[in-house]
Image: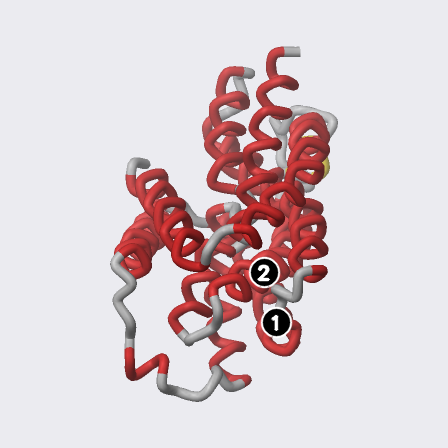
C-alpha cells in the first residue's frame, strides 16, 4: 500500500509537469522508481533498466493526454512533427537496446550539462540572432535532431520535452508551440522506447512481476492513472501563463533536470 501511494503521488506530479512543460515527467518518475525498487530488494544491476522502461511506458499514456490538451489550444506544430516524429521513434527504439548493453553515466552527464546551459540561456533570454534569423528547420535537420533527442530520451527515461522544447525555442518557435509540440513529440519517443525496453528485458531474470520485460506492471498502473488525470491541469496552466513566465519556469525545470542528471 505504501508503494502504491508513492506511485500515485509521483504520477500526479509527473502529470502536471507533462502538461505544463510538454515533458513526460520521467525526471520525477525514474528517481522515485529507483528508490522504491531498491527498497524492494531488486538487483542494482537492473533497477535503472526497470525504472527507465516503466517511466517510458507511463509517458506513452501521459503524452497523449497532454498533447490533446495542447492541440485544442492550437499549441502543436504538426507540420514539424511530420518529419521530427518518426526520427524520434527510431532514436528512442535504438536507445533502449543501447541502454540494455551500456552504462548511461556519461550520457546522463552530457544531458545534465546541456540542460544546465539551455536553462541559463532561457533564464537570461539570450537570443542567438544568427539562428533566429534563419528559416524554419528543414527536413534533414529535423531528422537528425529528432534521432538524437529520441536516443538520449530513451537512454534516460524521459519523454524528450526537456530537449525538444529548448531546441524549438532556439530555432525561433513561439514558447507555447514549443511546449505543445514537445508534448506531442513524447508520443513516438515513449511508445518506441517502451517497446524497446519490453523486448530487451523479456527474458531478464529478477524483474518483479507482473511485468513485461523491463516494464513493472504494478508501478505502471499507479503512475499511469495519476499522471494521465493530472496532465490536462498542467496544460491549462501553460496556456494561462505569460510567455516570459513560462520561459522562466521552463528554465527552472531544466535546472532541476541538470542537477538530477549530474548528481549520479
Give SS at disc 1.
loop
Most foreground residue, 47 or 21? 21
Q: Where does residue 108 sit, x and y in percent of width and height?
A: 36, 48
**Residue 96 visible in the snapshot:** no
Query: Residue 182 falls in which quadrant of the image?
Result: bottom right
Q: Where does residue 137 sit, x and y in percent of width and height?
A: 48, 82
Q: Where does residue 130 sit, x and y in percent of width and height?
A: 29, 83
Residue 136 vertical placement versus 29 (above, below): below
Q: Residue at x 58, y 64 (%)?
A: 181
For label 2, the residue is: 180
Residue 12 vertical placement versus 129 (above, below): above
Q: Residue at x 41, y 62 (%)?
A: 166
Mark 1 in CB contact with mark 2 (< 8 angstroms): yes
Residue 6 vertical placement versus 68 (above, below): above
Give SS at disc 2.
helix
- Left or right, 74 with respect to 44, comes to right
For label 1, the residue is: 77
Amino acid at each position: 500500500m505504501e508503494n502504491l501511494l508513492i506511485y500515485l503521488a509521483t504520477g500526479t506530479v509527473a502529470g502536471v509537469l507533462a502538461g505544463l512543460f510538454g515533458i513526460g515527467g520521467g525526471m520525477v518518475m525514474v528517481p522515485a522508481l529507483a528508490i522504491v525498487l531498491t527498497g524492494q530488494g531488486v538487483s542494482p544491476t537492473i533497477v535503472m533498466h526497470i525504472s527507465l522502461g516503466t517511466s517510458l511506458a507511463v509517458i506513452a499514456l501521459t503524452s497523449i493526454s497532454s498533447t490533446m490538451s495542447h492541440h485544442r489550444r492550437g499549441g502543436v506544430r504538426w507540420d514539424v512533427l511530420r518529419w521530427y516524429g518518426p526520427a524520434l521513434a527510431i532514436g528512442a527504439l535504438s536507445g533502449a537496446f543501447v541502454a540494455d548493453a551500456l552504462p548511461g553515466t556519461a550520457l546522463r552527464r552530457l544531458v545534465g550539462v546541456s540542460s544546465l546551459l539551455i536553462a541559463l540561456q532561457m533564464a537570461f533570454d539570450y537570443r542567438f540572432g544568427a539562428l533566429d534569423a534563419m528559416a524554419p528547420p528543414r527536413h534533414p535537420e529535423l531528422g537528425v535532431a529528432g534521432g538524437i533527442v529520441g536516443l538520449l530520451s530513451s537512454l534516460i527515461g524521459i519523454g524528450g520535452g526537456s530537449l525538444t522544447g529548448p531546441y524549438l525555442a532556439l530555432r525561433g518557435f513561439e514558447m507555447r508551440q514549443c511546449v505543445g509540440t514537445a508534448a506531442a513529440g513524447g508520443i513516438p519517443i515513449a511508445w518506441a522506447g517502451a517497446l524497446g525496453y519490453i523486448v530487451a528485458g523479456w527474458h531478464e531474470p529478477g524483474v518483479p512481476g507482473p511485468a513485461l520485460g523491463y516494464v513493472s506492471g504494478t508501478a505502471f498502473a499507479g503512475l499511469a492513472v495519476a499522471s494521465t488525470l493530472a496532465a490536462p491541469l498542467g496544460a491549462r496552466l501553460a496556456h494561462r501563463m505569460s510567455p516570459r513566465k513560462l520561459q522562466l519556469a521552463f528554465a527552472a525545470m531544466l535546472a532541476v533536470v541538470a542537477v538530477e542528471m549530474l548528481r549520479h
